[in-house]
Image (cartoon, grey):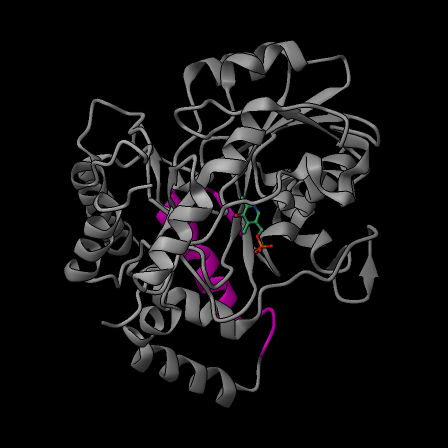
Amino acid sequence: MSNIKFLDLQKINAQHAAELKKVAAEVIDSGWFLMGERVATFEKNLAQFNNSKHVIGVANGLDALRLILKAYIDLGVMAEGDEVIVPANTYIASLLAISDNRLQPVLVEPNEKSFNLDIDLIEKHITPRTKAIMIVHLYGQVCWNEKLVAIAKKHHLKIIEDNAQAIGAEWNGIKTGNLGDAAGFSFYPGKNLGALGDSGAVSTNDDVLASQIRALGNYGSKQKYVNEYQGLNSRLDEIQAAFLDVKLRYIDAENQYRRTVAARYLLEINNPLIQLPFPVSAQFSVSENKEHVWHLFVIRCKQREKLQNYLAEHGIQTLIHYPIPPNKQLAYKELNTFDYPLTNTIHEEVVSLPISPVMTHEEVTRVIEALNLFSL
Ligand SMILES: *Cc1c(COP(=O)(O)O)cnc(C)c1O
């Protein structure tokens, strides 16, 4: 029996190999590798996909978030030492974007059912220095509601979306990345829309912010050799833009396929030792619920190590997202003394099952059967 990889990137890209090779050859032959037509076309197409006014290609997802905050600082919206609310159980990049700008991450516990930032806990963490809420659509599920919008409005806070895991997800017909004031996308190869290397993007409907970010990602320059701001070099390559433009055409179909895998897992896995993710939006069936794009299918199990070893023996690869919460990392020593009990429990129990647009029906069946036979 062959092994089931957690994510078969080779197979994912093999689906589009002919088109990818064709556009790679075109870029090579063009002799133009940065700030050209390919990037402009992909930015336009992603903006159209998302219904956002502006998309700016950047070097990676972390830079997308860093540049949003840096631009807000340049524009006087926030200043060094100001606070940004962020979920305690996110991937560390969300925090790095904040602290790199000498802003203070303020960690808030997630909701146990959604794994997303608990919106009901936000207000008690707001101080006079709070300037923004960075929501993370974790594992591909939308983190949004009317209450969040009302809190942001009441306290004059920007809402920044970390949309690294949720491209294509929708809330009431609005795509993630077009819900808040600005959003960061990651096209890391393993993301739902993955490049063949690093890349990312910012989306926003704010003209001034967009223009500032575009300059900041290009040495702080709008015109070559004229530098208005102290910027970075964080640009999307022509070749990655060309690859992404090919793959963008398939993202809706691929996300939909992920939903059908998730629907089977939710329906067919029934083992009391395993806690399945909760479909938060109960008004839809799983395969029709656009609020989730299932970047990851994360279960909880108190005997996690045993479960992972058992699945590995059955040729099923799993991963943990994430094994160590940001507040327990050496990189954030100053946060080590804070206690986030739910975040800690989640980090001790979560396991991510294989899910992808290239998993076969038989592979999904094998994962389900193995999980249902797991015992202590
Ligand atoms: C992947 C990811 C990032 C960072 O994106 P990179 O392209 O790897 O820099 C940020 N936030 C979250 C939640 C992510 O999953």
Residue segment shown in magenta: 33-55
Percent position of residue 86, x then y: 62, 29
Magenta span contains residue 123: no
Residue 270 left/right relative to 243: left
Residue at the spot x=39%, y=24% of the render?
A: 113
All told, the count of numbered labels is 0
Percent position of residue 293, x then y: 33, 44
Q: Nearer the viewer, residue 79 or 344?
A: 344
Percent position of residue 202, x then y: 56, 48
Q: Quadrant of residue 282?
A: top left
Q: Is residue 299 visible?
A: yes
Residue at the spot x=20%, y=36% of the render?
A: 270
Residue at the spot x=76%, y=66% of the render?
A: 224
Q: Nearer the viewer, residue 268 or 153?
A: 268
Q: Is residue 166 visible?
A: no
Magenta span contains residue 52: yes
Name, please, the residue furthest toward the front: 376
Q: Nearer the viewer, residue 137 or 184?
A: 137
